[in-house]
Amino acid sequence: MNDNVPMWSIGEPRLLAGATRGGQASRVSWQQHRALHGDLPALSLSTYEELASATGLLGRGGAGFPVARKLAALPRRGTYAVVVNGSESEPLSAKDRILMRVAPHLVIDGALGIAAAVRARKVIISVHDPAAAASLTEAVRERPDTRRVRIDLRPNRFVAGEARAVIRGASGGPGLPHGRRTLPSDDGVDGRATFLSNAETFAQLALLARLGTAGYAEHGVAEEPGTSLLTVTGAVRSPGVIEVPNGIPLAVVLEAVAASPDAAILMGGYHGTWIPAGSSPSLSRPALRRDGLSFGAGVVAVLSDETCPLGEVEHVARWLAGESAGQCGPCVFGLPAIVQDLGRALAGDKTGCADLQRHAGLVTGRGACAHPDGVARFVTSSVQRFGADLDLHLRHRGCRRPVLGQLATGPVSAPPSLVRHRSAS
């Protein structure tokens, strides 16, 4: 397992159960998985819908879409394919690749359980991380029920993790969004009905099928039972992937990773939102949504006051603009214009701010996929969050702080580390 990312849990682990032996990160084999979790029960589609609805299960890929509604949208005559989106193109996130590396059987369980319930012919797991693909491939060989499972190792680009890009790649095309606002349940693999969700979502379904509503709700809070995986990165002493009970206060997570309570926090990744200064929201998707925030891809990115925050944002925005599919005007022309506007503002040009807002307005809602909207939202929300820093740049053509690269534009990694389990207390 190369470029190891430290992982641990706050409270009892579920997704990461068994992934530590002798204090070291360890892949859970088929035999170990069955000893931990037991056999997966055979459930009908209606039963999966009922379980997902009763627990309010939301997708773990970023959009937080209700899983029960996705299941209800599938045709009752049968579904062609089940697709696991394990691509994790968000550069700040490591949770899905770690999950697939150490607990591949939970992901496969969830996919096979849904495939049986919807009578799908194919199960396709799309992944960008070679180590995760190797772990999944080994898992397929270990178990007797994976004849229909295919592992697709795809090139890694930011937009390649978008659902329609994954569907297009699984159908033999390029891993890019095709621009049509269609749902996988209507227009999926090979143009046929498909159930697609994120890798962690399938692992959650595997747990839910075994535990039932009451057992699943023993962790988390009433409005969002269960646990979630977070990737904590940036200016923290202990970066890594953490399994947490849903609803845990952000302050508890920051204390666990030895981050400053006054640090700036980006929640959800580069299509996510900045946490207001001094606040410690409950880390549940419904609670964050009520506050106008986003759980997104489960990223908690921390900026210290030693770096120039808007310089960090400009670096990321320039990278995001280069990651576009290049298929529509908002990406080809709009995103570079927004980056240029931000650079002018940081150099002291006051007209750059007005131009940035104008270009962001022209981009929003007009792209072939969600990427232009996400980038525009990231940049404009950053300018609002760091208004005092922007004033320094406009007055003095800079804030005299270096850009330390605390917001990464490559895979999150850290030196090999022990796997730690920390109690909620």
Image (cartoon, rainbow, N blue to C red):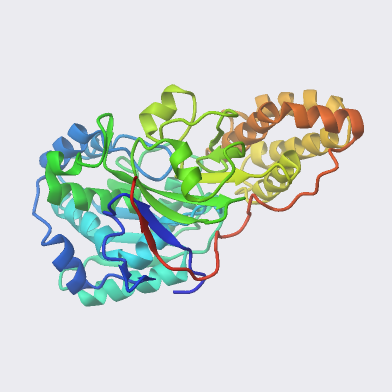
Q: Residue at x 14, y 54 (%)?
A: 116
Q: Nearer the viewer, residue 46 or 55?
A: 55
Looking at the image, residue 74 sits to the left or right of residue 187; the answer is: left
Looking at the image, residue 294 sits to the left or right of residue 336; the answer is: left
Q: Where does the N terminus fall, quadrant-wise? A: bottom left
Q: Is residue 45 visible?
A: no
Measuring from the top left, give residue 59's x and y in whole percent.
34, 41
Measuring from the top left, give residue 183's x and y in whole percent.
36, 39
Q: Residue at x 32, y 54 (%)?
A: 83
Q: Residue at x 70, y 36 (%)?
A: 334
Measuring from the top left, give residue 241's x and y in whole percent.
44, 55
Q: Is residue 149 visible?
A: yes
- Outermost residue, right side: 396
Q: Quadrant of residue 73?
A: top left
Q: Nearer the viewer, residue 340 or 379?
A: 379
Rendered position, 26 above or below 350? below
Q: Nearer the viewer, residue 12 or 38?
A: 12
Q: Residue at x 55, y 59 (%)?
A: 412
Measuring from the top left, give residue 231's x and y in whole percent.
47, 51
Rendered position, 147 above or below 184? below
Question: Exactly how many numbered labels are in the figure?
Answer: 0
Looking at the image, residue 125 sits to the left or right of residue 1; the answer is: left
Looking at the image, residue 337 sits to the left or right of residue 142; the answer is: right
Q: Where does the C terminus fall, quadrant-wise? A: top left
